[in-house]
Image: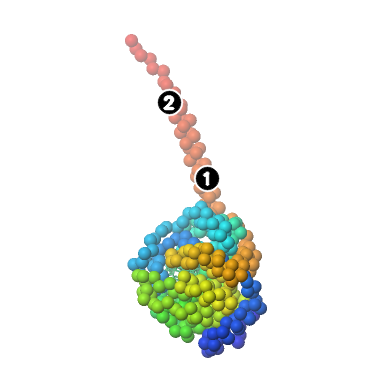
Amino acid sequence: MKVNSKYATKEALLELYNKPLLELVFEAATIHRQHHNPREVQMSSLLSIKTGGCPEDCGYCPQAARYHTDVDAHKLMTVESVVEQAKNAKANGSSRLCMGAAWREVRDNKDFDNVIEMVQSVNDLGMEVCCTLGMMNEDQALRLKNAGLFAYNHNLDTSPDYYDDVISTRDYEDRLNTIDNARKAGISVCSGGIIGMGEAVEDRMGLLMSYMQMENPPDSIPINALVAVEGTPLEEQKPIEQWEMIRMVATTRIAFPQSVVRLSAGRTKMSMEAQAMCFMAGAGSIFAGDKLLTTPNPEFNEDKEMFEILGLIPKESFADGEQPISLPDPIIEERKKKEAARAKELAEARAKVEANGKEDFTPRKVTVES
Ligand code: SAM
Ligand code: DTB
Ligand code: SF4
């Protein structure tokens, strides 16, 4: 049961969302136990591999170049530093690494080649690798898949009706296409949204309806509470009530019994008790580490304590699917071959010059006439 056919209309979802809270949580907890181990919660780490300077206008995002926020733009991280961060995250108990780039879309250039190498290297560490790089086409999705990508995150963010109030530089349809490309390449789809952007509850259910209408709903559905960042158009939004996050998590859990519901951004504003209710209601993952992409997240030690108090166990990697095999990337292999050939040519040329040079510099016999 990938979707719960009892709640396949917006009206049914609305009714569910508005149920007496404890009834809603009980129903969600019951479904959660039928499909998942309720003690297991995955710790995932986020890593901003390319920060800021994004040309898009997503109203919530501190990384959009057009908004004046505190985020400094950085170019793509090196493969080595990503691997180092991934090892740290793994040592701290994370079984998944989500690498985010402030790009509108993936481009076929050297930066993408580097991302392919990052995916290969992190997959080799035995972690689930997730990327969120903006829009991508089918070929790019296939390259990522062959590199060993486990999941692709691309959020619809909100309902189709509210979408245009938040973003104008990219269509809802574009997002659906990218999700489709990930799915066709055999990559696990991670797609969800943000609550607290001024949308109505109908829009939250509209977002869930978009997933209901897919042939295959996302394998994981992140639920973010808006982190209102100074300088963005949504800076003045009031934080949502904790109950709303619990309701959204519970409704998502019931509507998509097999998906992993990810309690994502916004946890710094939530009490441990409210988070406990989210886990009760079926949240199966958190982002661990004191930073999301650019905004704060609870300290690692706070989460460790929370896991101990609530009796939660960090979920191992690849519990929901086999580890992909990282295959050599033909484009990178070709480039490396060319670079090796060029290096060989250069070395030979240098050797020749040196050899000739030596001849050239053999002292000539000079006859000095007296
Ligand atoms: N640039 C890529 C894209 O937009 O697809 C990937 C990175 S983007 C930061 C990933 C997701 O983070 C967004 O789709 C949005 O759902 C979430 N996000 C960004 N800023 C946020 C904020 N201030 N509060 C909550 N979620 C946020
Ligand atoms: C998702 O749904 N939430 C994460 C992850 N996918 C990439 C990102 C949250 C970003 C919050 C704002 C920031 O830190 O910049
Ligand atoms: Fe760019 Fe992604 Fe932020 Fe939108 S959400 S502005 S695409 S980084």
Other-residue count near label 2 (Cα within 10 Å), few / some / many at <14 / 14–19 / ≥20:
few
Could you give the CA–CA distance between mark 1 and mark 2, rounded to whole angstroms?
A: 30 Å
Which residue is painted at 47% across and 70% down in the image? 268
- Upstream in the sequence, badge 1 or badge 2? 1
Q: Amino acid at mark 1?
A: Ala
Residue 158 can be seen in this image: no
Q: Residue 298: image x %, image y %?
A: 49, 67
Task: Look at the image and name its color scheme.
Answer: rainbow
Residue located beneath label 2 in the image = 361
Location of residue 353 in the rendering, given as x and y in whole percent from the top left corner: 46, 33
> Measured along the vertical axis of the image, is residue 200 above or below residue 107?
below
**Callout 1: SS:** helix
In the picture, which quadrant includes the N terminus? bottom right
Residue at 57 percent across and 62 percent down: it is 94
Q: Residue furthest front?
A: 309
| Image location (x, y in percent) of residue 36 | 64, 74
What residue is at 38 percent from the left and 15 percent from the top? Answer: 367
Q: Which mark is residue 341?
A: 1
For the residue marked with disc 2, what is the amino acid?
A: Phe
